[in-house]
Image (tube, grey):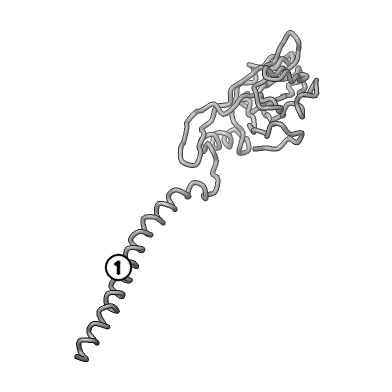
Amino acid sequence: MTQHTESSSEEPRRSFVVRAAAAGAGAVAGLVPACTGAVYFLDPLLRKKQAADPKAAEAASAAGMEEGYLPITKIESLAEDGTPRAFKVIADLQDAWNKFPQTEIGSVYLSRSATGELRCFNARCPHLGCTVQYKDSDQKYLCPCHDSAFEPDGARINEIPPRGLDSLDAKTAADGTVWVKFQKFRAGTAEKKSI
């Protein structure tokens, strides 16, 4: 009779150990794919930001430009009288998981003076981000959304926008290509803050 009680007390212990081992093995079997999935999902977000367009970076380096400059047009396409002209900015765009080759990432206004000095503005209005248009007849930039207005030098004419047009660095390479360091800036603030 003593043996019967010993075996009945050992069975719950054995049953507990078996169940605990099964739960542990199940947890490990479930954690491995869950951790692998989490690493795969978070990898693009945790990875260091790489150059958005490696080809553009190579071309900029070959033209003697620093990283971040994109080719826009030839200097001959700009009027010598300083009249601004709009250009699309095309580059490879990559978000965390997707790559979009040769996509329009924005637009700029370029002009040059008789002395060859370049002037470049981001075409986004600093008020709410609409695209401004240059009206040659009025010789000013106008925003179609909220009547923001800017001088040819980018200074604001009225108090609607919080700041003047956002200027960008522009350089001419030896072959006559105009390169622009394209950036976007936060709209709606007086401070010119890159995003």
- Rendered residue at 74%/13% (across/down): 81
- Rendered residue at 72%/24% (across/down): 119
Residue 101 at x, y percent in the picture: 47, 31
Which element carries disc 1, helix, strand or loop?
helix
Q: Quadrant of residue 51?
A: top right
Judge from the rendering whether residue 95 lies leftward or rightward of residue 115; answer left or right.
left
Q: Quadrant of residue 118?
A: top right
Q: Quadrant of the C terminus?
A: top right
Q: Residue furthest bottom?
A: 2
Q: Quadrant of the N terminus?
A: bottom left
Placement of 168 over or under 75, stated as above or below: below
Question: How would you rate the neighbour count of disc 1 (Cα within 10 Å): few for under 14, some for 14-19, many for 20 or more?
Answer: few
Q: Amino acid at mark 1?
A: Ala
Residue located beneath label 1 in the image: 22
Residue 95 at x, y percent in the picture: 51, 38
Residue 73 at x, y percent in the picture: 60, 22
- Rendered residue at 31%/74% (across/down): 16
Q: Residue furthest top?
A: 137
| Observer-nearest of 77 and 96 | 96
Q: How many marks?
A: 1
| Observer-nearest of 185 and 23 | 23
Residue 13 at x, y percent in the picture: 29, 79
Judge from the rendering whether residue 115 lies leftward or rightward of residue 105; answer left or right.
right
- Rendered residue at 75%/36% (across/down): 191
